Amino acid sequence: MKIIRHFFCEIKRNREPAPQLCAVCPRIIKCKSFRSWNKLYHQEYLNFVVDITKKFPDKYAMEVYFMAEKQTFVQIVDIATGKIEKVVSLTEIESLSAEDKLTLSRNKTLFIVTHRIEPIVKIELKKSVINAPIQFMDNIPKEEEPIEEVTPLPIKPDKPKAKRPTKS
């Protein structure tokens, strides 16, 4: 049976991480819950960020940060092309059988790496220079209205209630 893991925001304790919250969060690079949440929902987060910047190109800009994860990883490099195929956790490699390890290492070079750097895209509000003073509607003084005298309405006396006949 697979256990469902719940992630919670470190700033707003009761909220679960979501693209809308994490894309503008100042602690996104340091957030542990975002790291684990991002592993599962990486594509959903990236789609959200790209959609927002396409919808509002004059308001928002994308910024890329690099989030380093410290753990022991194995980097698999193809000998013929010299390109990195993938970076796998050392625990995943150790859990493989001997035959699987042998097929994985054929025509490949394996390197042990201590950090994995993952790019994280963040939305930044574009900054603009203000050249003229800004006037808000609340700062305009209101004209005083004349006070009218309110006369109370006449009070009508309550009608006496009829008595109910008692049952005997």
Image (cartoon, rainbow, N blue to C red):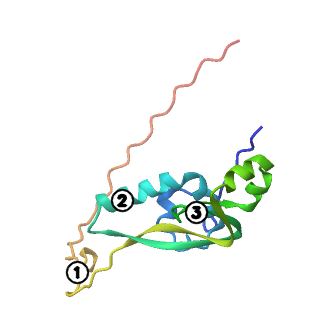
How far apart, in angstroms, are the residues tagged by discs 2 and 1?
Answer: 29 Å
Single out the mark in the foreground, 2 or 1.
2
Residue 26 percent coordinates (x, y): 52, 74
- Give me the residue at 58% from left, 21% from top: 164
Q: Are marks 1 and 3 in contact (CB under 8 Å)?
A: no
Residue 120 percent coordinates (x, y): 50, 67
| First of labels 2, 3 by sequence position | 2
**Which mark, by number, is residue 52?**
2
**Which mark, by number, is residue 9?**
none
How far apart, in angstroms, are the residues tagged by discs 1 and 3?
Answer: 66 Å
Single out the mark in the foreground, 2 or 3.
3
- Is residue 45 visible from the viewing direction of this image? yes
Query: As shown in the figure, which amino acid type bears the numbered disc 3?
Result: Ile
Could you say which is closer to the camera, residue 2 or residue 167? 2
- Give me the residue at 70% from left, 60% from top: 89
Rendering quarter of residue 152? bottom left
Q: Quadrant of the C terminus?
A: top right
Q: Is residue 86 left or right of residue 140?
A: right
Q: Secondary structure at mark 3?
A: loop
Rendering quarter of residue 141? bottom left
Q: Is residue 9 left or right of residue 4?
A: left
Query: As shown in the figure, which amino acid type bears the numbered disc 1?
Result: Gln
Q: Quadrant of the N terminus?
A: top right
| First of labels 1, 3 by sequence position | 3
Q: Return the residue at label 1.
A: 135
Query: As shown in the figure, which amino acid type bears the numbered disc 2?
Result: Ile
| First of labels 2, 1 by sequence position | 2
